[in-house]
Amino acid sequence: MINGSAIANFTQTIGMEVLITGSNLSNGTSIGIIGSIYSEMPPLNVVKPKTSDSLFYDVKVLNVSSGNATVSITESFVKTEHMNTMEYWNGTAWVQASSIVVVNDTIQGVIPVKELQKTPIVIVHSTAVAPCRLPGRGPCCCGGCHNTATHNTETQEAAATATAGG
C-alpha cells in the first residue's frame, strides 16, 4: 500500500485489474486481492440478474475496508456498441457500480472496497447472443459449448499481495 493505493493486475489470467485508491491504511501495509471468473452462472446463493446476457466474476480484498476499487475487466463479451453495465452483489441485491466506462472490450467501474469481501460482480449487456467463456479456452458463442454443468463448476482464480515501503 503506497499513499492509500494498491493495484493487482490479473489481465493475463482472468482479464481483470483492481486498483484501490483512497484507503486510510499506512504505507507498507500488506493487502491481498483475489479475483475469480465464474462464466455465465453466478456463485451459489446469489440471485441471477434479470438479463440472460451476463458474465460473473468475484473479487475479495483482504486487510483493507476503506477507499474505492476501480475494477477493470477485459472480455470479448464487452462491446462498445452494446449497452454494458457492471454490478456487484451486496448480499441481497445487485447494485450498479459507479463511473462505468467502456472502451473496446474493457469495462471499468468503481465499487467501494468495503463491499469487496468475496463479492460477485456481473457484466451485463443487451445482445441476443448468450455469452460463453470456458476459463483458459477463450470465448465461444452461438451454441456448441453451453454445458451448464461445466460452467457452474469451472472457475479460474488469481491472487495478488501488495506491499510497499513508506
Image (cartoon, rainbow, N blue to C red):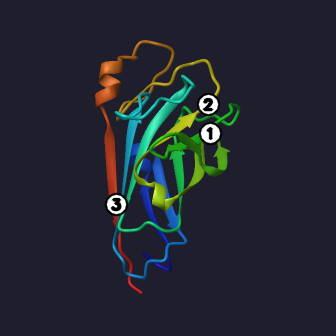
| Earlier sequence position, callout 2 versus callout 1 | 1
Q: Amino acid at mark 2?
A: His
Quarter of the image that includes the N terminus: bottom left
How packed mark 3 is, by other alpha carbons closer than 10 Å (few <14, some 14-19, many 20 or more), is: some
Q: Which mark is residue 160?
A: 3
Corner quadrant of residue 125: top right
| Earlier sequence position, callout 2 versus callout 3 | 2
Instruction: Answer whether labels 2 and 1 touch (C-beta < 8 Å).
Output: yes
Element class at badge 1: strand
The picture places residue 82, in percent across and down from the top left corner, at 68, 31
The picture places residue 154, in percent across and down from the top left corner, at 30, 31
Element class at badge 3: strand
- How far apart marks 2 and 1 lie (CA) works out to 6 Å
Instruction: Answer whether labels 2 and 3 touch (C-beta < 8 Å).
Output: no
How packed mark 1 is, by other alpha carbons closer than 10 Å (few <14, some 14-19, many 20 or more), is: many
Element class at badge 2: loop
Note whether 9 is above or below 127 in the view shown. Answer: below
Name, please, the residue furthest toward the right: 81
Q: Amino acid at mark 3?
A: Ala
Is 135 displayed left or right of 113 in the figure? Answer: left
| Earlier sequence position, callout 3 versus callout 1 | 1
* Front label number (2 vs 3): 2
Q: Which mark is residue 85?
A: 1
Is 132 displayed left or right of 161 in the figure? Answer: right
Quarter of the image that includes the C terminus: bottom left
Which residue has dot 2 on it? Answer: 125
- How far apart marks 3 and 1 lie (CA) works out to 26 Å
